[in-house]
Image (cartoon, helix red, strand yellow):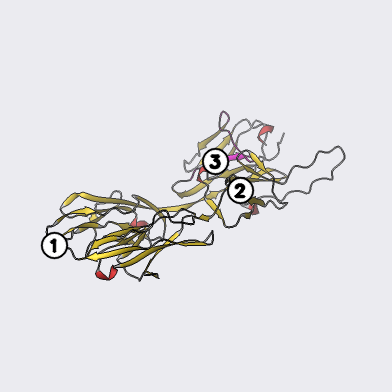
Amino acid sequence: MLISKILLCCSYCVLADVPITWLSSPRASVPCVLPDADRIPARRPPPPLEAEDRPRPKPYVWKKGDEEVKRVLSNGTLEVSKKKDGSSEGVYQCTARHHAGLVLGYPVQLKFAYLDKQFSVHPENATAWRGQPVVLNCAISSGPAASISWQKGGEPLPQNTRYTVLKNQLLITDVTAEDAGLYRCKATNSHANRTRYSHEGRLQVEEYPGDPDTDPGMLPVHYEKDIAVPRGSTVVLPCPVTGWPRPKLIWEFSQPGERTSELEATDEVLTLRDVGPEQEGVYTCTVEGNSDLVKTFAVSLTEPARITVHPTSKQTFRASTVRFNCTAAGKPAPTVTWYKDGKPLTLAGRIVVLPSVDGKRLELLIRSVTSEDA
């Protein structure tokens, strides 16, 4: 005896990893996006309702957690309004109904964009020795993170390789007398359509007295030890050092299974452009003659998660065994979660995930198929 088709949906992400969708206005419309919508059979026209028939189930249902959301249009679009208590933000997911069952849509994490009215940290007045590095700070709360640029004397900073913007910091290496002046931050959040300016801080530049000498040290700046970026990105590795006479930096690079090689660069900021596989590895900067002053950066490439082999609907006999393949690729390796009729599938007993015969993928295996599996 044949049972009806079994429809299972495969997803490569879990809710905790859902990227944020930033909403620009207090009211927003969010479409129900289904995986491979062109591969999903169209819903069959429902039969005419008779008096004793129950109301037809909704073609689209949105949920936030376990709670069903009411404001859904007939085409599956979710209507969201901003609430002062933030309760309208969070992870939402839709399901679409058709003749073979339910199809789970991609989850979306919704947040409303904002930019605070005031900076929490303003640039402070500072004094720098000529030839030494200096860092200026500013900070403002923003969602998503604001684009930070710096101005000097009310004008955008001139193009100069000695100026490096590090998140909420401005790093100036090899300071000269021309760097003296008033600096401020400009924060822009394009999603919120807002721009803010910080107070100004004055930078004074003085000649180093020359005596006595000062021991070398690492200037504290913002940096990340583990840097994962898409192919083609630009990566900035800051390693500013203080001291007089000026210390010399040594940059080294190593890849797994390869010897460590010394780079020609001696700059306090190493910039990697158009990053590719040949630039993946560990970068180390060390102050010559002082092995205690060292900083390490691990650079790796990421690849978007994608489903390369999709599960297909199947017909089978009762008590038989069915295999479904859902292969995903990405870097880091994505997590594959199985769903049935819009709900996570419980893997236990006769329903398990096992390696395929060739060992190249994981398959969903359903033994002793029953009508409940349809």
Q: Which residue is the site of mark 1?
A: 210
Residue interval drawn in magenta? 334-350
Does residue 20 appear to the left or right of 97 in the view shown?
A: left
The amino acid at mark 2 is Lys
- Please, what is the dominant secondary structure of the magenta stretch? loop
Q: Nearer the viewer, mark 2 or mark 3?
A: 2
Q: Position of residue 183 (x, y in %)?
A: 35, 65
SS at mark 3 in the image: strand
Q: CA distance from mark 1 to mark 2?
A: 61 Å
Q: Which residue is the site of mark 3?
A: 337
User: Could you classify mark 2 by the number of other residues whose Cα lies within 10 Å: few (under 14), some (14-19), or many (20 or more)?
Assistant: few
SS at mark 2 in the image: loop
Q: Is residue 167 visible?
A: no
Give the mark, 1 or 2, whose residue is nearer the N terminus. 2
Q: Residue at x 27, y 63 (%)?
A: 173
Q: Which mark is residue 83?
A: 2
The amino acid at mark 3 is Thr
